[in-house]
Amino acid sequence: IRSVSSLKYDGIKVSLTDNPKVIPPHDKLIFGQVFTDHMLTINWSHDDGWNTPHIVPYDHLSISPAAACFHYAVECFEGMKAYRGVDDKIRLFRPMENMKRLNNSARAASLPEFDGEEFVKCLKELVRIDQKWIPAHSTKCSLYIRPTFIATEPIIGVQKCRNALLYCINCPVGPYFPKGTFNPVKLYADPAFVRAWHGGVGESKMGGNYGPTIRVQTLAESEKNCDQVLWLYGEDRQLTEVGTMNIFMHWINEDGDPEIATPPLNGIILPGVTRDSLLALGKTWGTHKISERKITMDDIKIALAEGRIKEMFGAGTACVVCPISDILYLNESLHIPTMENGPEVAKRFYKELTDIQYGVVEHDWTVVV
Ligand code: COI
């Protein structure tokens, strides 16, 4: 049994552990496997509204087995990071974007909304308390922050929840893919599988959008020699997103112009913060047309045959920027010459983004903790 010391300030009740864990060496970190000493919990009930936020020692939750999160996936989550900068300061990256998305997902899950600015205050406090867990400055490491929101109502009727828990756990992380940073990944694209559809909840960060992808991901890895799934949509096989990231293409478009393109946010694609940031950074260059446009598998095949595709890469909080080398589509392996082309644009995005996140360049996208 852990004993805890308690103090209360800034509206957050804090109970510190007196039994801190051993922090693993940063070069041995595997994504999402070790968690820091503390977590944040905020309870909500329909009758009393939001309770005081608590920062408590990381521990199991006690939840009724009847809770709606277990039965009907009434839950959503976020993914964000804290970075240890070159100046040793700790920064969050565009945290209010995650708060907006969390509340959008909460609405889709019929969960209540929480004030984003207040939640960021709580997250900053949690990060400060566990700051020794944030790896020393290295663009390969960071602290992954996982806000999670679950319906805890102990009733198995399918109904709007009257009890919920918003909590956050954090883990020090290295590269998301076991292959490491900037090693290209192979994608498996099979129109037989669909991740999301119009009128559904594909743009929300809900567990229900990820759990059902695991069997296809397993197929991709174990039988197709691929790393991730490229989700297609519709008769014309539009590219939507990759398992854990949005997708970008650098090519010479049909009009002969250099273009950086990503599929548009049409309700079936996760609105990635990294995606949005790359679009904004690319626009400052003035070198390429920056487009949110439909891209189909036929567009890719034709452009490849004509030698117009320069690079493809994924972008996401967990994976940052990740080059793509091949797409296995209808048993045909399409080689994407990303690595042969530098990858010039992917590397530039990676550098500009991480320079901001790690404080090499000061930018109003970052919030010092
Ligand atoms: C992220 O990039 O933050 C994600 O949430 C991807 C994931 C590990 C599900």
Image: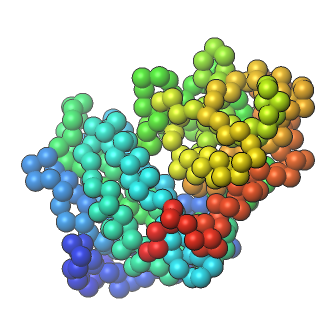
Quadrant, the N terminus? bottom left
Q: Residue at x 76, y 40 (%)?
A: 250
Q: Residue at x 66, y 16 (%)?
A: 236
* Image color mode: rainbow
Q: Residue furthest left?
A: 47
Of residues 312 and 360, the one nearer the viewer is 360
Residue 65 appears anywhere in the view: no
Of residues 247 and 39, the one nearer the viewer is 247
Q: Residue furthest front?
A: 286
Quadrant, the C terminus? bottom left
Residue 72 appears anywhere in the view: yes
Of residues 169 and 203, the one nearer the viewer is 203
Quarter of the view holding residue 332: top right
Q: Residue at x 25, y 60 (%)?
A: 42
Quarter of the view holding residue 291: top right
Q: Residue at x 57, y 75 (%)?
A: 84
Of residues 190 and 281, the one nearer the viewer is 281
User: Left or right of 254: which side holds 98?
Assistant: left
The picture places residue 178, in percent across and down from the top left corner, at 70, 57
User: Left or right of 80: which side holds 331?
Assistant: right
The picture places residue 147, in percent across and down from the top left corner, at 40, 57
The picture places residue 305, in percent across and down from the top left corner, at 89, 25
The picture places residue 162, in percent across and down from the top left corner, at 17, 43
